[in-house]
Amino acid sequence: MNLFLRLTLCCIMLAASYANAQTNPAGTAITGNVMDKDQQQAIAAATVTLYKNNNKTSIASITTKANGAFTLPVAGSGLYKVSVTYIGYASLIMDSIVVKAGQQVALGNILLVKQISDLQGVTIVASRPLVENKIDKVVFNAEKDVTSQGGSAIDILRKVPQVNVDINGNVELQGNANIRFLINGKPSSSFGNSLADALASIPASQIKSIEAITSPGAKYDAQGTGGIINIILKDNRLRGINGTVNGSAGTRFESGSVNLNYRQGNWGLSGFFNANAQLSSRTPSYQDRTSYDTISKNYTRLVQDGSSDFTRHSYQTGLSFDWSPGKKDNITASFGYSYFGNALGGITAQQQMTTDASANLLSTVNTTRYSNSRSHNNSFDWSAGYQKKLRKEGQELNVLYSASFGTPQNSYLLSQNYTGQPTPYTGSFSNNPGTDHEHNLSIDYTHPLSDKVSLETGVKTVWQHINSSSAINNLAANGHDYAYDPSQSYQLGYDMKVYAGYVSASFPLFNYLDVKAGARFEHTALQIDFPNTTIPSYNTLVPSIAFIRHISDKKFVKLTYSRRLERPEYKELNPFINRSDPYNFTTGNPLLKPEIGNNFELGYGLTFPKGGNIYLAVVERINTNDLKPYTLFYPTYTVGDSVYTNVSVTNRQNIGKEYNTGLMLSGSVPVTRQFNLRGNVMVFQRRVVNNLPNGNIANGTNYRFNLNGSYTLPKDLIVEAFGNYNSSINTIQGKRPQSLTYTLALRKQFWNKNASIGLTATNPFSRYVSQVITINSLNYLAYNTTWIPYRSFGISFLYKFGKLEFKKSKDDNNNFIQNMPGT
């Protein structure tokens, strides 16, 4: 669908909405602000419905804004009734409201009380649906997905609408892999070294919800051209002592976690500990590649056939505290520690055959390679925040400081023998320790100018320091001793400082559109200490705007635009060369520039009366300075005083521009009270323009879809089937493979749903998933085949404990109707 057609469709929708809005005469309305009675906080997206005083059929309906305000147009004079509802709160009805033509009736602050029921000593609060479509994001309430509690964050992300996870754990949001990951709204250095390892270290049982923010406003950091994924860990704001214990074991993955919460009066304390491991699994691999030396005019064919064993393990712990000294003040603090590591080692048989231009065989060399590479990261994260509600309703000040201290470390060991020879003829090992420190300080202020207009502004500073050193040791001629090689070793120092400020406003337009527009300015100052390397500082202006039309409380149309950028992370910048495969090197690139993204989205959301929802969107994503992995072939490659032959080197490069035009459909449909279907379909037409030397253009259509069906049987038994398919994707140098994965799960709840036991089976009928990646450049063609062990069986157990206590304060009775404002 071209841009003209998309804009035409948008205009038609907005025009239809405008025509519908004109049925309500201007000036006659009922206004108010919906708030949580206990927390004294605004409730966004509450449903306000208008009735004639003695009529059960609704006349109009609207949802509250972010500050809880609403303006409900009224057709004419008379007696009216207003109903206010929100999930998890007791409904509130106000009747006999006198409305006169041309006047506005102000209901003031409408206080809703949380709806609580008691079941054998355990208090249950009305819960949200599994999937929520909001204006700027989709929320997946993972704690409601009972069949996924034995996995990790990767397993939960596979079920989040508009998110795609491939078989290697690479994550995309609306087709873009450059995503800003947050935990509880704060960054962590653990994501910068190995995203897949960091996500695999978070157990699903610890996750409350995942927010996929596709249209971030000016308040959010500009980082992440693909958007933001915020992982919210479980907490509990209910009074008393309570917690959960979770454990799982299986053929590939095992984990355990404990979560404990205590809340008394106006303060609360939460703590957790978890650990998990991916058990050793063997991955066969095969590479067949042909290269051409433009100087010697010879062809070299290299065949590598081997296998590697992979393990991963991690553990995390954390403590959080919050205290409300007054109704308008809240202080929070948290501290966390995480560790994850992995190891990959194996044996590979290698055969290298060289021929001349006439296909005459010049030489054949048979060798055996023994290799091992390891990576681990320790990360300390802490934060402190203060929230102050000021005199005016919706007026708020927030101050947040957060920091992350990471110590990533990578290493490898390599030796090669001629076939049949006991002593290695070459080898090396390297250790690459580093540090990744980051500090964030932000101040945000919200000021309502009126019931309909709100202003937000704030400033933020980010300091990041990266240090990395590499010590290379090469095998001596005797085949036993290793000697330090200063010519290949290095030191890297990298400093980044970001100074940002933003302003954003929310206001109505033409009496039928809600608009949120803003701009963020970021100055990024960079310094690098690395031989022959300089990088400039830069300024970035990041505008964003969203037009929203609430057709009803169940339907909305939106049109959004946001500009984003992607700054490279630690692993992408780190120039450490992993030579565990002497013919295929991987390294970082300290010269990377930030990727700039311009994102457009036209979407329609619908919530069904009996639960469930659908979301349909057309998106356009345009990236410049596009960051992509890139492979170059070198007949000879020099590192320090060492010369390597027939080598491919892969790192990330700014390759040019990428255009993604996509259509997305996601939804959750309650077919019956017992049977629920959830699906997610994404189709993208991608065009990548490679501006590097000898670059080319890659075009192609790719699609992804998944389907999840769950059925609740009698006696709290739940069965589920989940399948995910990714089509192959054309790249600028070849093709990435397709993949199909599926999971069958069963979970039995007992002890009044306080405990459950689950069984899962992933790809039970096939041990491996075959992945064939092709790389093709001017003088290089490679076919890389990997058989990924994906079949697994597991069992998990979850237990919730603790009696929840609630004390009703003396002013908890809702006296709004008795004290309704005059009309």
Image (cartoon, rainbow, N blue to C red):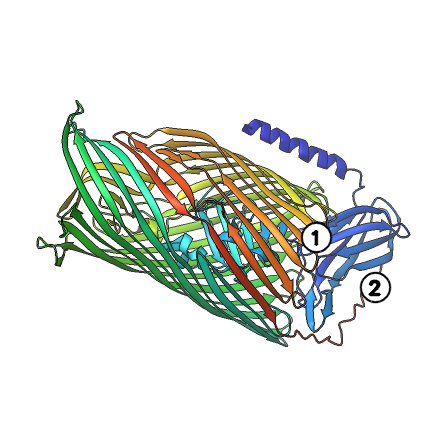
Cα distance in 3D space between marks 2 and 1:
20 Å
Q: Nearer the viewer, residue 80 or 731?
A: 731
Compared with 226, 411 (above or below) is below
- Specify whether 195 is left or right of 27: left
Return the residue at label 2.
Answer: 817
Query: Residue 90's quadrant in the figure?
Result: bottom right
Residue lying farthest to the right in this orientation: 54
Return the residue at label 1.
Answer: 64
Compared with 269, 284 (above or below) is above
Query: Residue 778's quadrant in the figure?
Result: top left
Q: Nearer the viewer, residue 386 or 172?
A: 172
Q: Quadrant of the N terminus?
A: top right
Q: Nearer the viewer, residue 604 or 195?
A: 195
User: Mark 2, residues whose alpha carbon is within 10 Å: few (<14), some, or many (≥20)?
Assistant: few
Q: Quadrant of the C terminus?
A: bottom right
**Image coords of residue 637 (percent x, y):** 18, 41
The first of marks 2 and 1 along the sequence is: 1
